Amino acid sequence: DEIFIQRGILCVPDMYLNAGGVTVSYFEWLKNLSHVRYGRMEKRFTENMNARIISQMEELSGKEVNDKDRLLIMHGAEEVDLVHSGLEETMITATREIMHIWLSSPEIPDMRTAAYVTAINKVATSYAELGIFP
C-alpha cells in the first residue's frame, strides 16, 4: 500500500472488490427465506402500467410506438435485472461512503484504510443500536 501511495496509484480496496459476491449471496439468502423469486410480485403490474402509459402517449401524440420499442418499454424486470440493480445500488453507496471517509479525514492515507474505517463504524453502530456496546 505504501508503494502505491508513494507512486500516486489509486488502489481499490480488496474488501470492496469482494463485496459484490457477498452482496449477491446475501440477496440469494433473502430470496430463499421468502421462497419467492425477485420480481414475481410486481413484474405483471409494471408491464401493465407501462402498457397504459404507452397507450396514453400514443393517444396524446397521435403516433404509434413501433413494436420493438413497445416491447422494450413494456418489459417488466426479470430477477436478474433486479439483482443487478440492487448490486449496483449497494456498490455505488459503498463507494460513496468509502470516498467520503477517505476525502474528509486527512489522517486516512488510502481507500483501503477508509474501507476498514467504514466497516468498523458500521459494526460499532450495530452494536450500539443493539445495546451490546459500549
Image: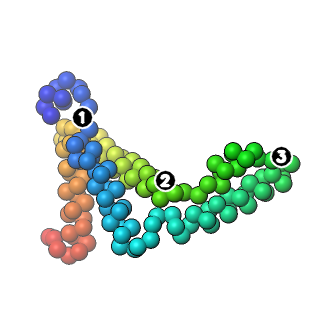
Q: Name the residue beneath numbered marker 1.
A: 11
Q: Amino acid at mark 1?
A: Cys
100 sits left or right of 11 in the view? right
Per the model, the C-alpha gap separating discs 3 and 1 is 52 Å
Q: Closest to the observer: 18 or 117?
A: 18
Tell me if label 1 and label 2 are in contact, CB under 8 Å. Answer: no
Q: Earlier in the sequence, mark 2 or mark 3?
A: 3
Q: Which mark is residue 81?
A: 2
Q: What label sits on residue 63 in the rendered view? A: 3
Residue name at image x 45 percent, y 66 percent: 37
Amino acid at circle 3: Lys
From the viewer's perspective, is the residue at label 1 or at label 2 nearer? 2
x, y (%) of residue 41? 53, 70
- Secondary element under disc 3, as helix, strand or loop, is loop
Q: Of callouts 3 and 1, which one flags the residue occurring earlier in the amino acid sequence?
A: 1
Q: Residue at x 59, y 58 (%)?
A: 76
| Residue at disc 2, secondary structure | helix
| Image quarter hosting the C terminus | bottom left
